[in-house]
Image: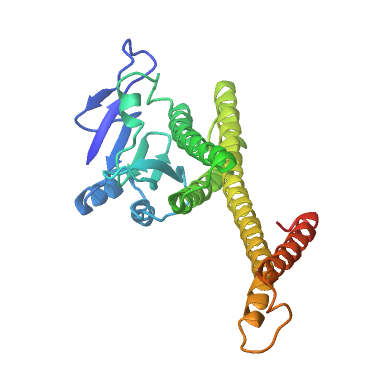
Amino acid sequence: MIRYFYRNTKSEVRTLEELSEGKKGAWVYVENPTEAEIQYLVEKFNLEEGHIEDALDIDEVPRFEVEEDQNYIFTRFVHTDASLQVDTMTLLIITSPNFFITISTAKLPQIDRMINGRLDVTTTQRTKLLLQLLNQIVSAYDTELAAIGRQIKATRSRLRHEDIRNQDFINFVAVEDQLDDFLSALAPTNAILRRLLTGKHLKLFEEDKDLLEDLLLNSEQSIESCRTSLKTIVNIREAYSTIMGNNLNRVIRQLTVLTVIMTVPTIVSGIYGMNVTLPFEGTPWAFAFVMFIIIGISAFLLLIFRRQRWF
């Protein structure tokens, strides 16, 4: 699907005008293109076909390429599928003196907000449009990272009052994969932003530089948030393993103490159960005396173990 949007600095309305065909200064929005549409784009805008094919690769890593007067910026944006699973998808942004093109296999979540005028977008200002789009993408990462942070915080709070469920650790595995995916997308994108900040490939006005510096700062904060969340998950897992190991050691010690204490009456009763002559077997108070000895030895052992903090 190919759509064309246009708005210049003189437009009185904030919404983007959708055109039937492209013209200079328009935003060419491409979503899940067919082979025929790819060939049309290559011929119409003189694009590198290899880069277009890379944009359709769901595992393509962010990078920056320059072909004559065209800039090819590969990045990844947050995408939620029909099953509400959060993933990242490849996005190719192409800028040149005459046009601005975005190509992706899935719908950009930010496209409606930019088209409907909730964000002041001017397609003829291609550098500003690029930075606004990248800012929307990074903001989407921030939203997901905030949700992940709340989930991790809730689990950490439960660790103080009750046992963590096995499902929490299963969820942690999914969260770690998601954070790794975010980090692998944000880190190269951050490098691209630094490259753009040099001004060698895009003409930057003072307002553009300020916007780019803010975007770079937000990207670095998102990267640090990913790393912090990953570290927190590792700390929770290690803390829980330590707690479980300590509890297991306590149980083993207590069972060992009980085994030792119960061994005394077992030995005595075993001895007095033999068919041989034993002391006090003819006295009426023999049973009480033997029980007294057993209780005394057991109490003595229990006192020793208590002093040693084993029980």
Residue 124 in the image: above or below residue 181: above
Figure quadrant of the N terminus: top left
Q: Residue at x 59, y 48 (%)?
A: 236
**Which quarter of the image is occupied by the C terminus?**
bottom right
Q: Find residue 177 and report its horizontal and vertical position in percent.
A: 47, 53
Which quadrant of the figure has residue 290? bottom right
Q: Residue at x 52, y 44 (%)?
A: 186
Frontmost residue, 142 versus 3: 142
Tally the marks.
Answer: 0
Residue 37 place in picture, x, y as percent: 22, 47
Residue 160 drawn above or below residue 124: below
Q: Is residue 246 left or right of residue 126?
A: right
Along the line of sight, which residue is nearer the eye, 251 or 39? 251
Q: Residue furthest bottom?
A: 276
Residue 3 x %, y %: 24, 34
Identify which residue is drawn at 34% across, 34% down: 109
Q: How is the image coloured?
A: rainbow
Q: Is residue 62 visible?
A: no
Q: Position of residue 231 (x, y in %)?
A: 61, 48
Front in this rendered view, residue 97 or 242: 242
Residue 286 is drawn in which quadrant? bottom right
Residue at image location 38% in from the left, 55% down from the top:
54
Q: Is residue 309 above or below residue 24?
A: below
Drawn side of residue 5 relative to residue 227, left or right? left
Q: Which sits in the foreground, 99 or 104?
A: 104
- In this view of the protein, can residue 37 be seen by the observer? yes
